[in-house]
Image: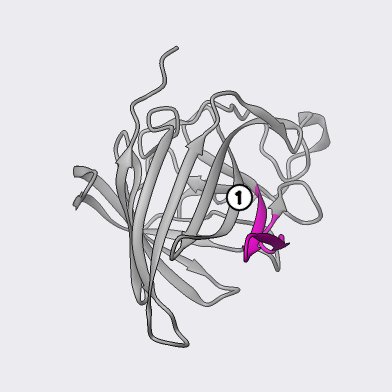
Amino acid sequence: VVALALSAGPVAAQDATPVGVPAGLSPVVDNPLFPLALTPIKVYIGEEEDPETGETIALRVEEIVRPLPAEVAGIEVTVVDVTEYEDGELVEVTEDYYAQDEEGAVYYIGEAVDNYEDGEVVDHEGEWLAGEGDNQAGVFMPADPQEGDSFEQERAPGIAEDRSTVIAVDQAVSTDAGEFEGCIQTEDYAPLDDVTEYKFYCPEVGQVREEFEGGFLDLVWFSEPREG
């Protein structure tokens, strides 16, 4: 198990960072397998089977990395805006918060969530922030993930408890966005929903594919790095 699972618990008050957030994090996220600055805009396309009707639902996810950091949970983070559509209808908008330590591990600080129905916000289910209550920052991507490494991506008890295990390395993946090599494959388990997903992360791009029961999501386009 990779040591970055935060088994030591909350940081001490003298670290000048909120409880549940490691000290010394930077908003610059350039981990080779999760390089937010290199791919500031991504578009994913896929489909899933409706468990009630058996019909196929078209999926589209758009991600935009904000060019400037923001202060969240008392630290500077990179914000990623994620917009999700099902059959062309807006279903969710989130702000995901990330920061990176000196070794290159990426931490997930939390997310703000707007869930939509018929064009209106209906709730904020799944929202959490490190430092609030028992919530702690999770390790989203270790600095040097190896096969067999396990880490807790979300540490919000009763809200989001997703954890990930690297099950393969040096993988080749092909999507409409290109041919990718040197990728890792993870098995992600959400115990609160009892859902397992498989994701592929590739150098200089990040996530390129997600597979789950009854569906998939593939990267189909990503932008060049922003100038300056």
Colouring convention used in this rendered image of the protein: one colour
Q: Please name the residue shown 26% across and 47% down the image.
A: 183
Question: In front: 145, or 60?
Answer: 60
Question: In front: 22, or 112?
Answer: 112
Magenta segment's dominant SS is strand
Q: Please name the residue shown 78% across and 38% down the image.
A: 18
Q: Amino acid at mark 1?
A: Thr
Side (left or right) of 127 relative to 99: right
Residue 204 colored in magenta in the image: no
Question: In front: 160, or 223?
Answer: 223
Quadrant of the rendered image containing residue 99: top right
* Count of numbered badges drawn on the protein: 1
Q: Position of residue 180 (x, y in %)?
A: 20, 43
Q: Please name the residue shown 54% across and 54% down the image.
A: 153
Q: Position of residue 143 (x, y in %)?
A: 43, 38
Q: Position of residue 199 (x, y in %)?
A: 36, 57
- Point out the image quarter for the C terminus: top left
Side (left or right) of 193 relative to 60: right
Circle 1 sits on which residue? 94
Question: In front: 133, or 52?
Answer: 52
Residue 116 colored in magenta in the image: yes
Magenta stretch bounds: 111-127
- Point out the image quarter for the N terminus: bottom left
Q: SS of the residue at dot 1?
A: strand
Vertical side of 172 occupied by 157: above or below: below
Side (left or right) of 190 relative to 175: right
Answer yes or no: is residue 211 visible.
no
